[in-house]
Amino acid sequence: MGLISDRLHRLAPSPTVAITDLALNMKAAGRTVIGLAAGEPDFDTPQHIKDAAIAAMQAGKTKYTQVDGIPKLKEAICRKFARENNIIASPDMVSVSTGGKQILFNALMASLNPNDEVIIPTPYWVSFAGIVEICEAKPVFLRGSGANPMKITAEDLEAAITPNSKWFILNSPSNPCGIGYDMDDLLSFAAVIRRHKQMHVICDDIYEHLTYGDFQFATMAGLAPDLQDRILTVNGVSKSYCMTGWRIGFGTGPVELIKAMSKVQSQSTSSPNSIAQYAAVAALDGPQDFIAENCKVFARRRRLVCEALNDIDGIDCPHPDGAFYVYPSIAKLIGKKRPDGAVIETDSDFVSYLLEAGEVAVVPGVAFGLSPYFRISYAASDEMLEDAMARITNVTAALS
């Protein structure tokens, strides 16, 4: 009998972490690697949020808290959901955890049984599938059937549902491709969910404030309040508030689920960081104007990256609706040869070539369930992005 569990052998390591670690090791060896693999804003946490954390420390707010969040933060979260999302929630319908990922983990661990199915549109954030597999349930990957393979329709969702289907995970705007689902899309999904009483929905809204152009963010629980007892709305302070390292995520859903999630959390991390919780109160209740200013910077970077990539022969880069990622297709590069004679057969081959020859770290599309693509995070300085685009242009031009 081996030491490591069978379930862990079925779990693939995070490719984004693997690429980031490789890039860091190359940097440590003296290589000038540009890392565009991690999804993290490059802006500092706003000062008023840091000040709230300092005040909490000075006031002695450094002890264990309630397992799933202090009342003050839960109340702030309820205000946020009412103010921004038209979701009416009470504190007992709110859970606070060590990042949004733990909210997802707790919910799926608390609700999934073997043979349960979780419908996940592709391309998908890698941890969706990984968490489902840890829970010994079955991820069901759903590709769009229309002209855009990165966006599903209500008809696609309907066709994927079986008697074993329990959850549908919807991330909008999406990591990795930035696709957004608007009000009409969400209402059509809600109509499908109503017809299947065993179905529940996780709406991962972590990028809600980072949207561009004409796209208008909406979330299902706000549009279909009759389904609120079957929806878990997940959010957090990491992306919009530049607080990735503070590790505070939150969600609202039916009381029965929230209580079960608290039970799971009580046997893992217990309470989130006390100081970060008080900082999160300041984030949610304090000034919000910096979010729009940051979004303008992201919009500029989005335009820079999309234009540069679309100027490269063999790369097609859609403009994302939100988040801070692009997900360009390299279908036209498959089959081309590197200068050393090796053939680019997959998006992993291209990403490896880009790292070796151009010293730019990105993530292959296979990691997100849709190939041949790759993901770039443009949460980096304009100068770094311009350098990276020049490197990608040069190494791609060297293919024959």
Image (spheres, helix red, strand yellow):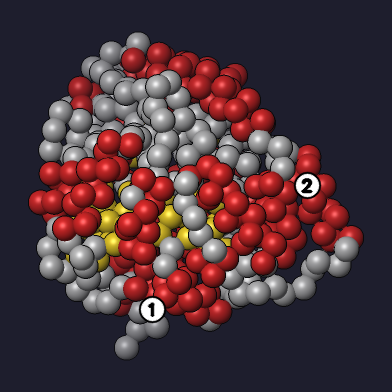
As drawn, which residue projects farthest toward the right?
Answer: 58
Q: Is residue 74 visible in this depiction of the protein? A: yes
Query: What is the distance, in whole Å, between disc 1 and disc 2 at their CAs?
Result: 41 Å
Q: Which mark is residue 4?
A: 1
Q: Secondary structure at mark 2?
A: helix
N-terminal of the pair, mark 1 or mark 2, is 1
Q: Position of residue 137 (x, y in %)?
A: 26, 70
- Residue at the (82%, 59%) spot, across then down: 56
Asked if residue 375 lies left or right of residue 300, the reply is left
Q: Residue at x 36, y 23 (%)?
A: 319
Residue 341 visible here? no
Q: Is residue 348 shown above or below 170?
A: above
The image quadrant that residue 199 belongs to is bottom left
Place of residue 189 in the rendered image (x, y in percent of width and height, measured from the top left): 24, 47
The amino acid pointed to by label 1 is Ile
Q: Position of residue 130 (x, y in %)?
A: 35, 61
Q: Quadrant of the N terminus?
A: bottom left
Q: Position of residue 394 (x, y in %)?
A: 40, 16
User: What label sits on residue 383 in the rendered view?
Assistant: none
Query: Which quarter of the image is occupied by the C terminus?
Result: top left
Point out the residue furthest to the top here: 311
Which kind of residue does numbered mark 2 sit on? Lys
Tell which of 72 and 32 is nearer to you. 72
Secondary element under disc 1, as helix, strand or loop, is: loop
Residue depicted at 41% across the width and 72% down the height: 257
Query: Which residue: 61% across, 75% down?
Result: 67
Q: Quadrant of residue 163?
A: bottom left
Badge 2 density bin: few <14, some 14–19, many ≥20, Cα 10 Å: many
Front: mark 1 or 2: 2
Q: Dot 1: few (<14), some (14–19), or many (≥20) neighbours within 10 Å?
A: few
Q: Which residue bears the numbered disc 2?
A: 50
